[in-house]
Amino acid sequence: MTASEPGDAALVARVLEEDAEAFRALVDRYYAACARYASRMLGHRQDAEDALQETFIRVHRGLGAYDERQTFRAWLYRILVNECRSLARRRVRRDRWLLHDAGAAERRPAPSGERDADLRDALQRALDDIEPLLREAFLLKYGEGLEYAEIAALTGTSVSALKMRVKRARDAMRPGLEARLEE
Amino acid sequence: MKEGRLAARVAAAYRRAAPLDPGARRRLDSELNRMPRPRRRRRAFRWFGDPWSLSPAIGLAGLAALLLLGVAIGRLVPGSHEPARLAPPLVGEATHPVEFVLVAPRASHVALVGDFNGWDPRATPMARRGGGGTWTARVTLPPGRHVYSYIVDGAEWVSDPLVPLAPANEFGVRNSVVLVAEARSS
């Protein structure tokens, strides 16, 4: 966002004055970041798309009740995090029945020479191997750059517990990632 | 490798996440175009949609008032000795549906989710009983142990305080448990 662009609060006010373009501008501003979080959190492209679709529809539907005392970004991430949690729960149930790894296509090793894709793949594998709560805290902190206080507000978890989760995530991911990065 | 360098490489890789299908954005825009435009709710009623917007003091006072009101109704109304908040039966018959009941007078929508419906919020919407604040759903369950929760207004996951809770799941959430017994042959 540049200095000339309206802030989130101004865009929300315009949406509530029935300016449809203002909501499109909010989606433009946050779609890529939300897509990144959902993809990494769920490790599955179709689930990430579903989570995004449902998140922005809920935001649109609930904007009339949005409380300006919390930032729009924090409110949006709270809905996104809840949606990813719901999808993950449903996926556990679904995969138990289907007995196949629906995320395998997205996590297959990249062809040699595609260094960026290889690194992305290594990161996703490391993320997939840690507990969902650790992954969630790590992605919100290091992926999206949220402050611990913001993450605490949107997940309902204490700051000290979040710091511990992020540390545990780092410790669990470091050996595999270091080996890959040293290659 | 130094921790700072590792973090920087990880952050860079994270930001180069594989993009989603461009069609997903088009589908979202199309869906949003079909939806009615959002309108600001009157501030006095904003807490209906977001009870967390209340200050903790007002919230606690409101909760205490509701509890007192429930106790008063239970004592004063003849024949009204059932708790205001009904628990689903802990043990039922496989051949009979289990009724889930939640008192949520401020809710505009309540869904029942559990391992029996794939945790799908759209699968089992609850019905408002008699236009009041009591929401019900009847589900036929196979014998065994089932874990469930309620979703109020599409966002708040509410466990049932009057029934046993399952151990925390992978997200640290404790859902409620209902046990359905094997049907006895007569």
Image (cartoon, coloured by chain):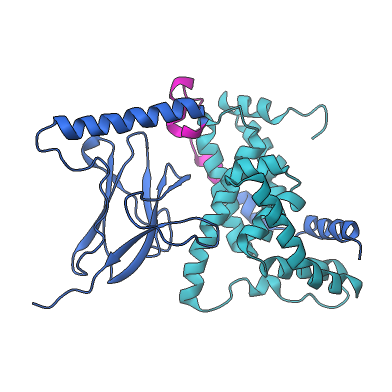
Chain colours: A cyan, B blue
Q: Which residues are the magenta region?
A: B29-52
**Residue, x 67% and y 53% (percent of image)?**
A137
Instruction: Identify which residue, A154 or B22, lies in the foreground.
Output: A154
Identify the main secondary structure in magenta.
helix
Quarter containing the C terminus of chain B: bottom left
Along the viewing direction, whichever of B34 and A64 lies nearer the viewer? A64
At 91% across and 75% down in the image, what residue appears? A183
Note whether residue A90 is visible: yes
Depicted A51 relative to depicted B55: above or below: below
Q: Quadrant of the N terminus of chain B?
A: bottom right
Seen in the image, is A104 located left or right of residue B60?
right
Query: Does A19 appear above or below A145?
Result: above
Q: Position of residue A97 (x, y in %)?
A: 45, 75
Residue B81: x %, y % from top left:
15, 40
Would you say B59 lies left or right of B76 here?
A: right
Please check the rendered image and state whether residue B31 is part of the magenta-colored stretch, yes or no. Answer: yes
* Residue A24 in view of the camera: no
Residue A147 sits in which quadrant? Answer: top right
Residue A165 is inside the magenta segment: no
Q: Residue at 53% of width from left, 45% of height from top? A: B31
Where in the figure is residue A71, as x and y percent of width and height? Answer: 65, 33
* Left or right for A102, reference A145: left
Which of the 4 image quarters holds residue A100? bottom right
